[in-house]
Image: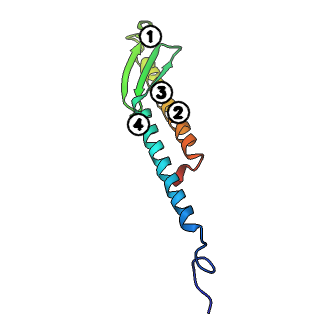
């Protein structure tokens, strides 16, 4: 009667050792990812809009740490432009942070992404 499931003829002799190597590599990758995440969270990301009229700095935790306005862009009669420039700078800073984060994690996982 044929065996069901598993490997034909039982487990190959080297399988337990290979599994240990895979587990060690996964643990090493997890540690590297945790270290990279901590480094990213401690970093800051700066973006500008309107040719430097608005500058926004965010942390790796996606918290705004600084907003600076060029005095020439502050026009009480055109608050909407200032709002739009601020929003554009914030969104660009977030995109920068996410791009750098994805790039750094991709280097660690080698493109495995969703597996870990």
Sequence order check: which comes first, mark 3 or mark 1? 1
Sequence order check: which comes first, mark 4 or mark 2? 4
Residue 44 position within the rendered picture, expressed as x and y whole percent measured from the top left: 43, 26
Marks 1 and 2: CB-CB under 8 Å?
A: no
Q: Is residue 46 above or below residue 41?
A: above
Residue drawn at 47 percent across, 29 percent down: 91
Residue 62 position within the rendered picture, expressed as x and y whole percent measured from the top left: 40, 33
Q: Which mark is residue 93?
A: 3
Residue drawn at 57 percent across, 50 percent down: 112
Q: Is residue 116 visible?
A: no
Q: Which mark is residue 37?
A: none
Identify the residue position indicated by label 4 in the image.
38
Label 1, secondary structure: give it. Answer: helix
Q: Which mark is residue 73?
A: 1
Residue drawn at 61 percent across, 72 percent down: 12
Marks 3 and 1: CB-CB under 8 Å?
A: no
Question: Who is closer to the viewer here, 5 or 8?
Answer: 8
């Amino acid at each position: 009667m044929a065996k069901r499931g598993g490997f034909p003829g039982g487990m190959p002799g080297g399988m337990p050792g290979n599994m240990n190597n895979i587990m060690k590599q996964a643990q090493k990758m997890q540690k590297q990812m945790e270290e990279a995440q901590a480094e990213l969270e401690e970093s800051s990301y700066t973006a500008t809009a309107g040719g430097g009229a608005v500058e926004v700095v965010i942390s790796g935790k996606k918290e705004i740490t600084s907003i600076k306005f060029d005095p020439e862009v502050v026009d009480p009669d055109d608050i909407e432009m200032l709002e739009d420039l601020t929003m554009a700078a914030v969104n660009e800073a977030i995109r920068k942070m996410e791009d750098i984060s994805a790039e750094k994690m991709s280097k660690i996982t080698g493109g495995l992404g969703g597996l870990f």
